[in-house]
Image: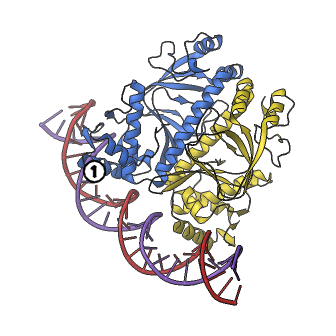
Chain colours: A yellow, B blue, C purple, D red
DNA sequence: ACCTCGCGTTGATCTGAATCAAGGATGCCG
DNA sequence: CGGCATCCTTGATTCAGATCAACGCGAGGT
């Protein structure tokens, strides 16, 4: 009943947005199409600071962004990884709760928050679709809590690779549920911040997985998954699907 | 514009539900009132197993429930703590992603999922209110990720006490933003599962906070906050508000 | 009274990951 | 080409928290 909102192509965006931006028959969504605009960010640029007024919502068209939280003494924790098609922003919230940073050059498809929210009020499907997406994110965040609280360093690394591989496959609409060759979109330090580790430990565990024949590397960033079953086992993932932020 | 949904008293429930159950003038909500029913659970009883079909949604009226995730080898991580007025369930999801367990005797105010969802389709406010609640939970989950990934054992304990104290105060609609005397609703082991620690470490850190004059204990469960500023400082909480599950 | 059971505390020891430290590889720019 | 910066790897050492183990305490139950 709300199928036509999911995976519809958005105007001239290169990717399939998940819902909020649709070339769709309904008037409401045509209006959405009319209020959208694009913004580009450079690698390393901060898109929004925690506490800032949020002026827009939108979704990632290309590039990678991260959601991070920082303590006064500098300890950082990444709380979300935004890949193309992911949605950013909180309708109904005035300020951002976390820093949003572009880690690569980035293009976003944005909607000014005010008109978007007005639209949401008059278009129930949008709120319902956003609810669905937010519930997915919540589930993903809770999966991540298990990783942060209970997994070993090795399991954390294996999980991260598995998750990125799954996301990659989904994005490229591959047959296989998991991509066998993945570009890690993050530096070792960023991975460490995501996994609650130090960059040295990340490096060591990647080396260990390579030494043990679970993965192989091509350069620093490209990972070839040598033994997919082994990787999943190492990840300690009981969860069937494994969702991501 | 949706103010009358928030904090309205629900029929004969003893507590103020957050939104979904209202003695409200509108037809739609009167219908909600008509499809609700109560369920009781005993302490220790599992309400829903991960993977189970979810037949209802609802909110906690009295008692405490937890959301947990378990790995095959028995490692557990609590991913949510449900206090009175918290909502359980995912409209639009067929199965539960986590175990839900009553840790004390518990009463829930439930709605069968089917009619609730139909209602949601015809009543935009409900979806919007649920979206708002889910966004709150997501923010809380992400705060918790910082705790799990980066805080020390001592900071974790201080944070837990601070959060429960804040929730308590909010629930009792006290003047002070933080209750100064709190009943910990969890065993040491449950706290450990929530914080990603072992029960021994939890016990030791509580003893340490007591020895250092930050808190004092009355029995095992009742905590008196001796030095509120110190506690907040120990929690390492930069966040102003501090939200909970 | 005694036993038992669930919960909590505390001590001794071990260990996985952090920390401290030194280099290596790659790419950019003068 | 050399110099510098960024990112990554690897080794040595330390330390916070896990693990292993013993014991205390109160609530039921018989």
Percent of width and height locating residue D22: 23, 56
Question: What residue do we see at 57% from left, 12% from top?
Answer: B24
Of A33 and B192, the residue lying toward us: A33
Task: Say which quadrant the N terminus of chain A sits in.
Answer: top right
> Is residue A74 shown above or below A208?
above
Identify the residue at image location x=68%, y=65%: A227
Percent position of residue B132, x then y: 60, 31
**Residue closest to the eye, B105 or A105:** A105
Answer with left or right where residue A216 lies relative to residue A1.
Answer: left
Q: How many neighbours does mark 1 have within 10 angstroms: few (below 14), some (14-19), or many (20 or more)? A: some
Residue B94 coordinates in the image, percent (x, y): 66, 33
Visible residue check, residue A203: yes
Residue at label 1? B208
Q: Is residue A64 above or below residue B108?
A: below
- Specify the farthest residue to the right: A25
Q: In percent of the image, x 61 and y 14: which residue is there?
A: B29
Tell me if A60 is positioned left or right of B205 in this view: right
- Residue C5 picture location, percent across and down: 31, 41
Q: Quadrant of residue A135?
A: top right
A100 or A241, nearer to the observer: A100
Label 1 residue SS: helix
Report how many numbered discs are placed on residues in the image: 1
Depth order, front residue of A98/B120: A98
Horizontal relation, residue D16 to residue B80: left or right:
left
Residue at image coords 66%, 53%: A65
Residue B73, visible in the rendered structure: no
Chain letter, disc 1 residue: B
Which quadrant holds residue B184?
A: top left
């Amino acid at each position: 009943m709300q199928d036509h909102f999911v995976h519809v192509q958005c105007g001239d965006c290169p990717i399939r947005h998940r819902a909020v931006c649709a070339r769709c028959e309904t008037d409401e969504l045509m209006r959405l199409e009319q209020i959208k605009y694009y913004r580009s960010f450079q690698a390393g640029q901060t898109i929004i600071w925690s506490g800032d007024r949020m002026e827009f919502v939108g979704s990632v068209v290309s590039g990678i962004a991260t959601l991070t939280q920082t303590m006064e003494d500098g300890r950082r924790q990444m709380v979300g990884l935004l890949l193309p098609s992911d949605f950013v922003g909180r309708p109904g919230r005035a300020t951002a709760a976390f820093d949003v940073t572009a880690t690569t050059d980035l293009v976003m498809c944005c909607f000014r928050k005010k008109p978007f929210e007005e639209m949401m009020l008059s278009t129930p499907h949008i709120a319902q679709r956003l609810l669905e997406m937010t519930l997915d994110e919540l589930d993903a965040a809770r999966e991540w809590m298990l990783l942060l609280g209970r997994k070993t360093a090795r399991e954390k690394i294996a999980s991260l690779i598995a998750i990125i591989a799954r996301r990659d496959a989904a994005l490229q609409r591959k047959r296989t549920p998991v991509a066998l060759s993945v570009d890690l979109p993050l530096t070792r330090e960023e991975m460490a911040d995501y996994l609650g580790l130090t960059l040295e430990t990340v490096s060591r565990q990647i080396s260990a997985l390579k030494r043990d024949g679970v993965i192989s590397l091509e350069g620093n960033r490209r990972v070839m998954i040598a033994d997919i079953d082994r990787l999943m086992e190492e990840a300690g993932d009981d969860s069937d699907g494994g969702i991501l932020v």
